[in-house]
Image (cartoon, helix red, strand yellow):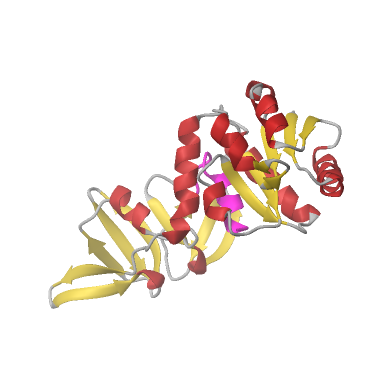
């Protein structure tokens, strides 16, 4: 794997290179640039690289100045001392943002995220758009409660008390923390984007789970996981294609 390192401080570059080597071993090569001008030249051969590690403030400006000049679709891991650029970083091809002085484990986690996102998929600009939308969603206001029609009237169900959501045709089943069932007139496809992705995960085509109500996780067949949800008798099982991303989500 070929990587591009954009870092103007030599000690920081050596530390980063050492951390990358600790994780990838000898299975990589790299190009190092320190200036905006050299970064533009390097990225003009973007198809050569699989991954970019970039500081933000470099000689001649910022790494954003490079990305503004060169159209490319390579994931970027930002390694910087400045936390005020987080939002802008994820409006580019950023997939991770680690602050100096970062640890070996923090860099490992960033590279693991890259491997999870791109190991089985070709680089696709649409993937960046989807991923940026997910990362920027931390500023989004999420659903706080659902209204449920009951015989006695309308009942409010707080989202934080929902442990499992299941597709039910064009409707959804909500299970609260006591295991009680509620039906809402929204499809799973409509409900899922309304939920905080730090708390809820869609484990298969028809089920969404809340992190706070997962009591146990055990292996299932064909690279799937069985989840025991508090006060829920129904099975909750990850699909085989989702399991890897689910494991990453659990460790956020």
Quarter of the picture containing the N terminus is top right
- Report whether residue 56 is seen: yes
> Which residue lies at the image location 72% right of the left edge and 30% below the top edge?
38
Residue 154, magenta (yes or no): no
> Which residue lies at the image location 50% right of the left edge and 51% below the top edge?
135
Query: Is 144 or 129 nearer to us in this picture?
Result: 129
The residue sitting at the bottom extreme is: 152
Query: Is 191 or 138 nearer to us in this picture?
Result: 138
Where is residue 130, by image quadrant?
top left
Q: Is residue 37 left or right of residue 151?
A: right
Quarter of the picture containing the C terminus is bottom right
> In this picture, is 104 found above or below 114?
below
Horizontal and vertical percent position of residue 169: 24, 48
Horizontal and vertical percent position of residue 11: 87, 48
Q: Is residue 138 left or right of residue 192?
A: right
Q: Which residues are magenta?
A: 238-252
Where is residue 156, by image quadrant?
bottom left
Residue 240, magenta (yes or no): yes
> Which residue lies at the image location 79% right of the left edge and 31% below the top edge?
30
> In this picture, is 32 found above or below 98?
above
> Which residue lies at the image location 66% right of the left edge and 21% below the top edge?
45
Horizontal and vertical percent position of residue 140: 40, 59
């Amino acid at each position: 794997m070929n990587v591009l390192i954009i870092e103007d401080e030599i000690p920081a570059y050596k530390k980063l290179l050492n951390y990358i080597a600790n994780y990838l071993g000898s299975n990589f090569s790299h190009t190092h640039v320190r200036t905006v001008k050299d970064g533009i030249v390097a990225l003009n051969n973007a198809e050569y690289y699989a991954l970019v590690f970039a500081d933000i403030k470099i000689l001649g400006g910022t790494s954003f100045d490079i990305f503004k000049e060169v159209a490319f679709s390579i994931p970027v891991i930002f390694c910087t001392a400045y936390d005020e650029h987080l939002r802008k970083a994820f409006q580019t091809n950023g997939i991770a943002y680690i602050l100096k002085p970062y640890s070996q484990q923090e860099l490992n986690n960033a590279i693991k995220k890259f491997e999870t996102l791109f190991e089985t998929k070709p680089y696709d600009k649409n993937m960046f758009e989807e991923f940026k939308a997910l990362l920027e969603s931390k500023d989004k206001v999420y659903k706080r409660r659902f209204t449920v029609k009951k015989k006695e009237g309308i009942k409010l169900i707080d989202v934080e008390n929902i442990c499992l959501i299941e597709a039910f045709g064009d409707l959804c089943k909500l299970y609260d923390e006591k295991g009680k069932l509620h039906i809402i007139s929204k499809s799973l496809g409509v409900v899922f984007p309304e939920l905080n992705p730090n708390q809820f995960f869609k484990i298969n085509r028809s089920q969404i789970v809340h992190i706070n109500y997962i009591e146990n996780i055990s292996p299932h067949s064909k690279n799937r996981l069985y989840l025991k949800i508090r006060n829920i008798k129904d099975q909750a099982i990850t699909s085989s294609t989702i399991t890897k991303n689910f494991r990453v989500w659990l460790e956020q």
